[in-house]
């Protein structure tokens, strides 16, 4: 069991030198003027998380992170977790079974190694900044919190470049310009771009279904016009739109934008069949075209 502060390398401040909690002073961890939250060691909020379990290891077996003063650690439900694993635990559901979380986290940590193919201008940083400290991102040039310390990348660029050069298994889009996020799906063990991942999650389907049953449909299943799955924007004429039941989420077919919009409008009526019948009667016999009306 991990015990807080037992390995802290910072010498406790004497009682005379202790700063009151929430007072401003120089933090003895990061050596910057900040609000002090731990008066025993004179540490700010960020450094408190980095030193409270100094020397301890993350309780996720496949994780090799050790608290060395550069990364925050947190304890919850008698489990000690590094910041990345803790955030993953919260996102997964902190009330779920620990064994289920470990299975998912192990699959995630076992994914293909990231940052293997990077643009030429991205180099390993000689003096890396600490995790989430402020700095200039090597890729976008913006000053932001650094997510990847080795290459000094912000969170946005870390996600964009983690699988730079890889190809989406579903749509064959290549992340060669660093403009399209690429992910590795641990469930199906394949690379997928952000757009395909969004479709999979939105329609609760699989990449296999998207590739073999959805993307192979090249004609609207109502009007038979040609459609494409690679055009940008759901309102573009000729773009393929996945039609689904809004109550069950089940995919029903693939339509062009016009037919998908029309189907959605008709479906709002209590009796779509009656509406369609009225429309046909209207088109065959326009009321205001009868002799003597106009």
Image: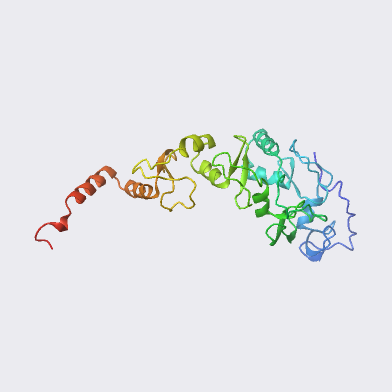
Residue drawn at x 70%, y 52% is: 119
Residue 88 visible here = yes
In the shown orientation, is residue 252 left or right of residue 144? Answer: left
Q: Quadrant of residue 56?
A: top right
Assign the C terminus to one quadrant of the image.
Answer: bottom left
Residue 271 visible here = no
Residue drawn at x 18%, y 54% is: 286
In depth, the one of 87 and 1 nearer the eye is 87
Assign the N terminus to one quadrant of the image.
Answer: top right
* Scheme of image coloration: rainbow
Residue 88 position within the rendered picture, expressed as x and y whole percent measured from the top left: 66, 44
Above or below, 145 relative to 176: below
In depth, the one of 50 and 124 nearer the eye is 124
In depth, the one of 239 and 80 nearer the eye is 239
Q: Quadrant of residue 186?
A: top right
Residue 214 position within the rendered picture, expressed as x and y whole percent measured from the top left: 46, 38
Residue drawn at x 49%, y 47% is: 230
Above or below, 194 relative to 141: above
Above or below, 26 relative to 262: below
Furthest residue toward left? 292
Residue 74 position within the rendered picture, expressed as x and y whole percent measured from the top left: 74, 47
Q: How many marks?
A: 0
Above or below, 258 relative to 190: below
In depth, the one of 212 and 33 nearer the eye is 212
In the shown orientation, is residue 228 left or right of residue 51? Answer: left
Residue 48 position within the rendered picture, expressed as x and y whole percent measured from the top left: 79, 54
């Amino acid at each position: 069991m991990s015990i807080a502060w037992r390995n802290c390398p910072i010498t406790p401040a004497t009682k005379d030198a202790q700063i009151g909690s929430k007072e401003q002073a120089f933090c003895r961890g990061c050596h910057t003027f900040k609000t002090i939250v731990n008066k025993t060691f004179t540490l700010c909020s960020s450094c408190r998380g980095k030193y409270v379990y100094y020397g301890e290891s993350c309780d996720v077996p496949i994780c090799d992170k050790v608290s060395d003063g550069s990364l925050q650690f947190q304890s919850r439900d008698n489990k000690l977790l590094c910041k990345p694993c803790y955030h993953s635990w919260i996102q997964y559901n902190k009330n779920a079974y620990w064994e289920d979380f470990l299975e998912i986290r192990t699959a995630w940590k076992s994914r293909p190694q990231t940052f293997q193919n990077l643009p030429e201008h991205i180099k390993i940083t000689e003096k890396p900044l600490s995790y989430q400290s402020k700095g200039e991102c090597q890729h976008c040039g913006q000053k932001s919190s650094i997510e990847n310390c080795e290459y000094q990348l912000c969170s946005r660029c870390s996600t964009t470049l983690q699988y730079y050069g890889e190809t989406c298994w579903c749509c064959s889009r290549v992340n060669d310009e660093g403009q399209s996020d690429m992910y590795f799906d641990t469930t199906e063990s394949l690379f997928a771009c952000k757009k395909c991942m969004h479709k999979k999650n939105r329609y609760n389907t699989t990449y296999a279904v998207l590739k073999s049953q959805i993307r192979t449909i090249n004609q609207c299943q109502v009007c038979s016009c040609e459609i494409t799955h690679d055009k940008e924007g759901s309102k573009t004429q000729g773009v393929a739109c996945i039609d689904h039941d809004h109550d069950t989420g089940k995919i029903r077919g693939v339509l062009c934008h016009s037919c998908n919009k029309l189907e959605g409008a008709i479906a709002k009526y209590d009796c779509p069949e009656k509406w369609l019948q009225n429309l046909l009667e209207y088109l065959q016999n326009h009321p205001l075209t009868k002799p003597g009306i106009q």
